[in-house]
Amino acid sequence: MADEAKGGALEFHPMDQFIVKPLFGDGGVGVFSFTNVTLWLALAVLCVFALMVLGTSRRAIIPSRTQSIAELAYGFVYQMVEDVTGKDGIKYFPYIMTLFMFIVFANFLGLIPMSFTTTSHIAVTAVLGFGVFIAVTAIGFIKNGMGFLSLFWVSSAPLPLRPILALIEVISYFVRPVSHSIRLAGNLMAGHAVLKVFAGFAQVTAVAPIAVLGVTAIYGLEVLVAFIQAYVFTILTCVYLKDALHPHH
Amino acid sequence: MEGDIAQMGQFIGAGLAAIGSGAAAIGVGHVAGNFLAGALRNPSAAGGQTATLFIGIAFAEALGIFSFLVALLLMFAV
Amino acid sequence: MATETSTAEKVESGLPQLDISTFGHQIFWLVVTLIVIYMILSRIALPRIASVLAERRGTITNDLAKAEELKKAAVTAEENYNKALADARAEAQEIVAKAKADIQADLDVAMEKADAEIAARAAESQKAIDEIRAGAVDSIKTVATDTAGELVGVLGGKADAKAINAAVAARMKG
């Protein structure tokens, strides 16, 4: 075959970066074993700790650089929660802040060359997405009782249309956690795979300059995506929470 | 031989699925362009709608990501 | 990519994201991570940042209030200054007026005294003049009477004192 000869020179392994492998020993991946996933999750925790605790340890009235970043993150998420869910959503702010800080740091740590992107794994984002889904549904039923079901009954629509709309609403409601988690994992996986593909093209001397430029450009885009996906995940969580707190259209 | 044909089908399918990414790109461009058009008409209202803009972009993009995922599954998982 | 070996590899590894054997591991560590981050944020970081922000807001408000107070104090001080200036001016005017009045009073007293003295002197002089005049009339009468008696005597008449006196008086009246 034509690309068999080429295949020897051009090695593409864009998906290898996502392989979960143990850091010590060659054994399989058990539930409690220490793998690269564990390492980069722990680093995300350390970064959150460094920014939010060590950065603010001086409690300065005139903030240092790190402290103002921490305050900026706080204000950003607080404003988002308040704007989208209203005053009664504020008590869920720590949970949403946890999600935001974790996703932001996991995304940005994944951009370090040779690192492992924990949020590119569907197992991770599915836990986040379904966690939000289950929590929000539970909150909706606890706060509104059966009134929560009025979320699916669009009272502003003409009566004959309502059952059809209700069906669509129910389907879209149950698709939410899927799209919520796949969006995050897919965006990061796609971006990192594209980076690796461009890096693979750099093996060919003729296109290497273009490939390097491409890697640079895609990297810039990925920095943007890393933040925007965290923002989108957080704001969609807020929107779902708003639906649970105020289900009436 | 049969394996080759099956693989060809995989690759062709993956390529077709990847068209969805381009379609999503059109969708995202539509969202952003319309937002910009609206924002230029009424700049004072634009600031409050950036969240809506990102949600719209996220929804449009998610579907592109789905098609990309189908392509990836065909390439690597099937 | 289409080589037999890579195909075999692919079948072996597949998409790493779909490797179900690692899911338990990832989910376990993710849950641990989320719980730790939640603890860090809700126990330490968020209350601290909230208190710092509240403190800053308080400080800014206080500073603004203090500035307002200082401004008010400055305005009051200026008012006091103007008032003091006006008071001082009024007092000075009063003092000047008082001094003028005192001087006027002194002057009046002195004038009065002088007038009285002048009047007394004038009266005294008048009296002296009157005395002198009265003395002069008497003297003239005596001289006239004497002269008339002598004249009458020289002329050979017998001087009647009573007639001479009456004649002199009549003459002097005339």
Image: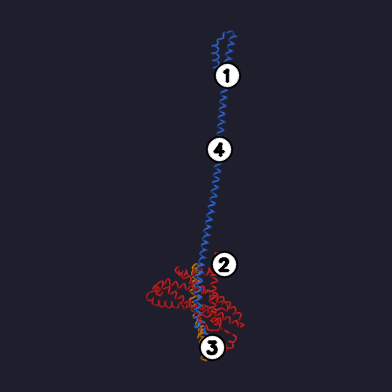
Chain colours: A red, B orange, C blue
- Describe the element under mark 4 as helix, strand or loop: helix
Q: Which mark is residue A57?
A: none
Are the numbered discs 3 and 2 placed on the same chain, yes or no? no
Chain letter for the residue marked with disc 3 in the picture = C
Looking at the image, tell me whether mark 1 or mark 3 is earlier in sequence order: 3
Residues at marks 1 and 3, CA–CA distance in whole angstroms = 177 Å
Q: Are marks 2 and 1 on the same chain?
A: no
* Circle 1 residue: C135
Badge 3: how crowded within 10 Å, few (<14), some, or many (20+)?
Answer: few
- Mark 1 nearby-residue class (10 Å; few <14, some 14–19, many ≥20): few
Q: What amino acid type should be assigned to the residue bearing mark 2?
A: Ser
- The residue where tag 4 is placed is C102
Q: Where C95 falls versus C2 (above or below)?
A: above
In what element is the residue under mark 1?
helix
**Separation (CA) of disc 3 from disc 2:** 55 Å
Disc nearer the start of the sequence (4/3): 3
In contact (CB < 8 Å): disc 1 and disc 4: no
Nearer to me, C46 or C64: C46
Q: Which residue is mark 2?
A: A64
> In terms of sequence position, does the residue under pointer 1 or pointer 4 come before the other?
4
Name the residue tied to disc 3.
C8
Spatial distance from mark 1 to mark 4, Cα to Cα? 49 Å
Q: Is residue A235 above or below residue A208?
A: above
